[in-house]
């Protein structure tokens, strides 16, 4: 257990799960999904009419 506490935080960072902020239909019939908080912003396009309410992203891919 103590060994885990000594590992750097960067070894555990890199992924974040976010709640859907906004969704809108694009001109070509796809759905643009926006996931934002005070630090990260992600956009995701899907063919579905509904965005996932929660989605996990790689923090390095933030807009």
Image (tube, rainbow, N blue to C red):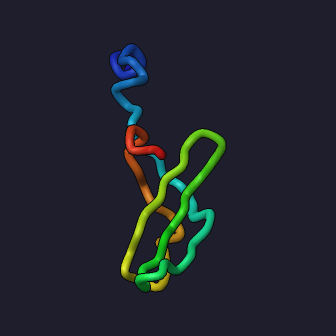
Query: On the rendered structure, is 60 left or right of 32?
Result: left
45, above or below 31, in the image: above
Q: Nearer the viewer, residue 5 or 51?
A: 51
Quadrant location of residue 22?
Answer: bottom right
Q: What residue is at 53 percent from the left and 55 percent from the top?
A: 18
Residue 63: give x, y in percent of width and height: 48, 46
**How many marks can you see?**
0
Residue drawn at (52%, 80%) of the image:
25
Relative to 47, does residue 3 appear above or below in the rendering? Answer: above
Percent coordinates x, y for residue 31 in the rendering:
47, 77
Expressed as whole percent of the image width and height from the top left, the position of residue 59 reads 43, 41
Going by the picture, which residue comes out furthest to the front?
A: 27
The x and y percentages for residue 14 are 39, 37
Residue in the image at 53% along x and 70% along y: 53
Residue visible at 54% across and 62% down in the picture: 34
Front-lying residue, 26 or 37: 26
For the N terminus, the image quarter is: top left
Q: Which residue is most to the right? A: 38
Q: Residue extending furthest top?
A: 6
Which sits in the foreground, 28 or 14?
A: 28
């Amino acid at each position: 257990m103590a060994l885990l506490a000594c590992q750097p935080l960067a070894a555990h960072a890199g992924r974040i799960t976010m709640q859907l902020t906004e969704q809108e239909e694009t001109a070509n019939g796809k759905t643009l999904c926006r996931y934002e908080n005070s630090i990260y912003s992600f956009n995701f396009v899907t063919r579905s009419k509904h965005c996932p309410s929660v989605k996990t992203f790689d923090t390095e891919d933030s807009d």
